Image (spheres, rainbow, N blue to C red):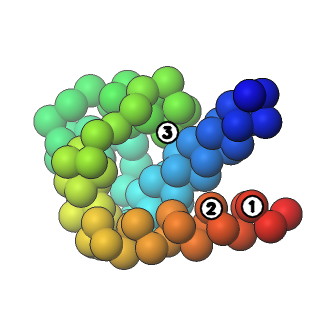
Amino acid sequence: MRARLHMHRSEQATLQELLKDMRVSAGLRQSDVAKKLGVPQSFVSKYEAGERRLDLIEIKRLCELFGSTLGRFAALLEKKLNEDGRE
């Protein structure tokens, strides 16, 4: 059970890292993303820190803001998760 919980935390950390990397690559600050979404900056900070979970529609909106698609995001996440699993 502990190994599965650890793996889940690692996967969540990979998701958080990817979202932050995509934001930074898009040249956006947390406050920029928050303003475009109409949410407080703390919303962005919390999902990047793992204190808040996002649903699929929220992730889709973020992908659009970052100039990507949900499909591309899913492929990148899958690639990163597979790389992390081999380490």
Give the residue number, with chain letter if any, for mark 1. Answer: 85
Residue at label 2? 81
Q: Are marks 1 and 2 in contact (CB under 8 Å)?
A: yes
Of residue 43 and residue 81, the one placed in the foreground of this image is 81
**Residue 46 location (% of width, % of height):** 45, 28
**Residue 35 drawn above or below residue 74:** above
Q: Quadrant of residue 75?
A: bottom left
Residue 35 at x, y percent in the picture:
20, 40
Q: In the picture, residue 74 is in which quadrant?
A: bottom left
| Residue 50 or residue 20, whichever sits in front | 50
Q: Residues within 10 Å of mark 3 (few under 14, many from 20)?
A: many
The amino acid on which the numbered mark 3 sits, given as a three-letter code, is: Glu
Quadrant the C terminus occupies = bottom right
**Residue 45 visible here:** no
Badge 2: few (under 14), some or many (20 or more) residues near its Cα, within 10 Å? some
Label 2 residue SS: helix
Q: Which residue is located at x 53 percent, y 67 percent? A: 78
Residue at point 40% right, 32% down? 53
Image coordinates of residue 43 in percent, x first then y, are 34, 29
| Residue 39 located left or right of residue 29 | left
Between label 2 and label 3, give the one nearer the viewer: 2
Mark 2 vs mark 3: which is more N-terminal? 3
Q: Is 79 on the left or on the right of 33, as rendered?
A: right
Give me the residue at 29% from left, 66% from top: 70
Rounded to the nearest whole Å, what is the CA distance between mark 2 and mark 3? 17 Å
- Distance from the alpha carbon under mark 1 to that under mark 2: 6 Å
For the N terminus, the quadrant is top right
Q: Is residue 78 above or below residue 31?
A: below
Q: Which residue type carries mark 2?
A: Leu
Name the residue carrying label 3. Answer: 48
